[in-house]
Image: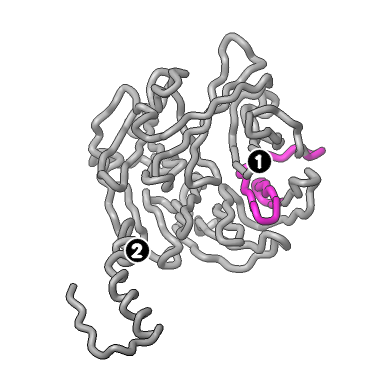
Amino acid sequence: MILILSGTNKGPTFILKIMMILFLPYLLSIFNYYLNQDIVVEHVYLDGINVSSIADDVLIFELNKDYSNIRHLVLSEDFYYLSPGEIDYKGFSVSVSKLDKAGTFIKEIYRPKDPKLITSLGYYPEKNLLFVAHNKSILSIDTNADKVVREVKVDKSITRILMFKNKLYVAGFEYTDESETYYLDVYDPLSLKLLDTKKEMNYVAGDKAFRHSSITSNDSELFVAMGTLNEIYSSVDDFKKPVLTFKNIYNNKPSGGNILFSSNQGLVGKFATTYFKYLNSNYFFIYDLKSDKQYLSKKGKNSGFYDDLKNTGFYSPLLTNSSEYMFSYKKYDTNENKILVVLFKIKS
């Protein structure tokens, strides 16, 4: 690019315009980084995906609890909040526990008298508010006092929530006899009042089976994976067109309704990730958006995400509220009262 400058007395406005011209290609490259990109799954299967290829670090802590699993986990500056699966609720979660950053259990901060399954957790760092989503309600917890502040009922089923730019985003679905609708709503995080419906995807009523939407973010964009195709939408264009589409997941075979198993689909660090089901097996897929390298492994006890940094075995990583971390867990077969919780710091 060649710029010819004439005159000697150029003011701040002129200089600003020149700077915008110089930086415009860079800004456009950022905007188009994910724009309408197709990720074609090559179906090259690995026995395991080395954690060192995807993550810079692994954080591990052990809990002396008889949890079946860890359903959800969110991070704050000083604490972890997790909703554990329990045997009495068939592996689903009805409570939230608070841990310090060393992984030490502090206390259980939420368990309703009338147990309701928890579908998602969210966190608002500026106000120290933890959000808990049930199937058709949302509540906020003041994490300074560890007490419920507010709870609202909604008329749609909720599958995921996430805070982004001082707004609470809520994804889910609703059914009528004629239609199935996936939605992305926006709530005021303090009053928990509905502000707007950002996106709806409507389909003719089927067998009333659905997949869980996923929400992820980075500093400038919110991403949502929703609907009956393996597509991810971005806040950059107000969720109008998919910015990423996973292609050939079913290897040129009929999907057979397997979109229901496309979960934890989103962007973390420099990667796009998804689980999917193909030929009666579940797989974990992760794609490096910078190098175009892809990793695919069967989800299982002896396959998937292998911790080659600390040699603790195989995992199935799940999304958190952070653009830098995924988490997983390992249940000890020989000791029902211990569970390992693992955080992966994903490369950016």
Label whose residue precedes the other's in the sequence (2 or 1): 2
Q: Residue at x 53, y 45 (%)?
A: 322
Residue 61 drawn above or below residue 166 = above
Find the residue positioned furthest to the left. 2
Label 1 belongs to which residue?
Answer: 78
Task: Label 2: state its secondary structure.
Answer: helix
Residue at point 67%, 46% (across, down): 132
Where does the magenta region start and end? 112-139
Residue indicated by mark 2: 31
Residues 215 and 134: in front is 215
Residue type highlighted by circle 1: Asp
Residue type at mark 2 is Phe
Q: How many marks?
A: 2
- Residue reaching furthest front? 8
In this orientation, does residue 210 appear? no
Q: Residue at (64%, 52%) from the top-left corner?
A: 125
> Measured from the top left, where is residue 260 in percent x and y?
44, 42
* Left or right side of 231 for 123: right
